[in-house]
Image (tube, helix red, strand yellow):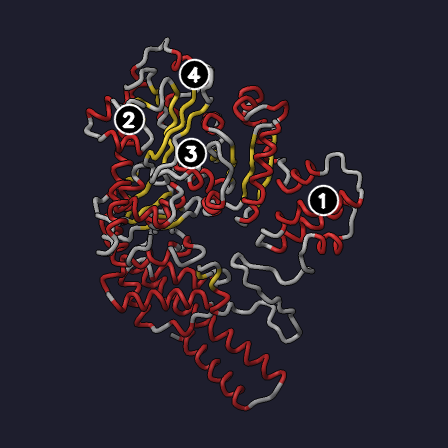
Amino acid sequence: MRFSQDFIERVQEATNLVDIISQYTQLKPSGSGLMGRCPFPDHVEKTPSFSVSETKQVYHCFGCHKSGNLFSFLRDYQGMNFPEAVEYLADRASIPMPAPEKDDAVRDQAVEKKKLLLKANKLAAVYFSEQLHRVPADHPVKKYIAGRGLSQEVIETFGIGYALAEWDGLEKHLASKNVPMPLAEEARLVKARNNKSGYFDIFRDRLMFPIFSAMGEPIAFGGRYLEKKENEPKYLNSPETPVFIKGKVLYGLSQTARYIRSDDLALIVEGYMDLVSLYQAGIRNVVATMGTALTPDHGKMLKRMTKNVVTLFDGDAAGMEAAERSLPILLAADLYPKGLTLPNSMDPDDYVKKYGAEALKAELDRAPDLFVMILARWMEGYRGDASEKVKLADKLKPLLEVIPDQRLRDLYLAEAAQKMSVGLPWLRQAVGLHSSGPVYSQKHSMTRTVQPNANTNPNPTPAVSEAVEGGKISLKGASKAELLLLGLVLKSRANFDLFVNEKLIENIAHEGMKKILEKSTDVYRQDLNKFDKLTSLLVSYVDQPEYLFQTGPNAEGDPGFDDEAEQKLLRDCFKRVRENFLRDQAKRLTKDLKGELSSEKLEQIMNIQRNRISLNKG
């Protein structure tokens, strides 16, 4: 769903970043902002270095250098995409979602229905949790949990509960909360009896695993039986509903997204207990499928957090088949998949219990490319007959043609050709791919490689078009003076006013830096009251947001200098930027003069030198 800028700003203004981050770390006043320990799991620290500006609504860690605003925090910590973050914050602030068009009554009804279904699921999740808490210590479900070694912390983290063995425990509870039974049936929590005289619970005598959306709302359930029963599946999963589409949900993601992003790796397992067991063992960058194959939507979700994935499926034939089915999905999503199957048909839970988490981590570090693993499986018993080569090429074709990155495709082609004992040109033709050409970007647009020549500057200043990478303005290669300038001018309105009055934009050498400062100036001039929002806005535009927070050698937490010293530092920065700009101009003109004498260029050089002398005297 698209949101208007007015609605997004309304949601932002209704939410305090401090309130969101305070749920995960304790913040205390420090200088002009607040400080606390970094909440991100890959940065364990004893001395607080995580700074939050309540005025600017931004955060920055001086230890791990993570920076951002409200939306980037929800993305990196909770795994939400932008629409999910906006919807979550709007609901949190009790702001109604934008009303649909007048002629879209059907959509209006669907939105209201989803709200009611989510409410029913939340009531059910709380009910299951309470039942687990209430049963005695000698109850089979408590013995099962003890046998699996699940801690109370993990049970609470994943909201694990228990469905009573009786037929209508949940049905009675929902009725007492005024939930209409037809709605509960649509949520797939109860089912109408054949004689139409009432309803009965779908989940009975099962350990319950709520399935959460990215916004942390229970949208479905998985239930595991405690003892094997005839004609009963080991796991009973909620059927799809208007709020739960299996192909768009990965179990555990709302709890593990922060670890996946921090570790830059997603571990994919097949079931609830595998994930929970690994999480308990300290391996927390995990997601699980729910009895279905991976889908393209799953691939897109994972790519938002990392490009590196490892499939960790059971070591039996079914596990290998699941890994094989996942390969084209992961490759098409432009991910780098690796694969690991465990010995003796063990599942991850069994393996960790027998060998420990460190042994599994070591195996994961050695995991081969999933493509190589699957190719080896296809080549079991391979003799190199002509017909075998053709058949294998046919199996490779659908894998290779979905890979967006031609560099990876070419490497896989070379790997396969070597193992098959065929020439690379033959295999390329056999799978229907043309000879290697320009590298494809993620949007499949082709970029031409320009070969340098004697007249090409080996370290040119990035052009504006080159300064934007993947929708972000690149600050790579900017000078220290320009980076310091950026941090200082964003630090206070007084500094920004000085910068604007100085008219320094034309003296900025780095085009990415010039672009971001021009954007800042445009926003500021449109509305002087928007200064406090500048940093939060720019976070979304730059490739390295930590540069927005650099204000000098003592920037970590407390700048340590007064206003007068800061003003002097800023003016010194102005001077250094101008000096650098004039020096670079003089160098360029001097180089041009060597190739062709020009009185005009000679005069320009003399003017530049006079300006440099005047600048130094000032």
Cα distance in 3D space between marks 3 and 2: 18 Å
First of labels 3, 2 by sequence position = 2
Residue 451 position within the rendered picture, expressed as x and y whole percent measured from the top left: 65, 69
What is the number of the mark on residue 126? 2
Marks 3/4 in contact by CB < 8 Å: the verdict is: no
Q: Between label 4 and label 1, give the one nearer the viewer.
A: 1
Query: Circle 1: is it few (<14), some (14-19), or many (20+) Cα within 10 Å?
Result: few
Q: Which of 409 and 486 is in front in this view?
A: 409
- The answer to which quarter of the image holds residue 493 is bottom left
First of labels 1, 2 by sequence position = 2
Q: Is residue 266 above or below residue 486?
A: above
Q: Is residue 40 above or below residue 592?
A: above
Q: What residue would you read off at disc 3? A: 252
Residue 10 position within the rendered picture, expressed as x and y whole percent measured from the top left: 23, 53
Marks 3/2 in contact by CB < 8 Å: the verdict is: no
Query: Circle 4: is it few (<14), some (14-19), or many (20+) Cα within 10 Å?
Result: some
What is the number of the mark on residue 391? 1
Identified by mark 1, the residue type is Lys
Cα distance in 3D space between marks 3 and 4: 21 Å
What is the number of the mark on residue 226? 4
Cα distance in 3D space between marks 1 and 2: 54 Å
Identified by mark 4, the residue type is Leu
Q: Can residue 63 be seen in this view?
A: yes
Q: Which of 478 and 533 is in front in this view?
A: 533
Q: Nearer the viewer, residue 526 or 346?
A: 346
Q: Give the position of the C terminus as an image quadrant.
A: bottom left
Marks 1/2 in contact by CB < 8 Å: the verdict is: no
Cα distance in 3D space between marks 4 and 2: 20 Å
Dot 1 lies on which element? helix
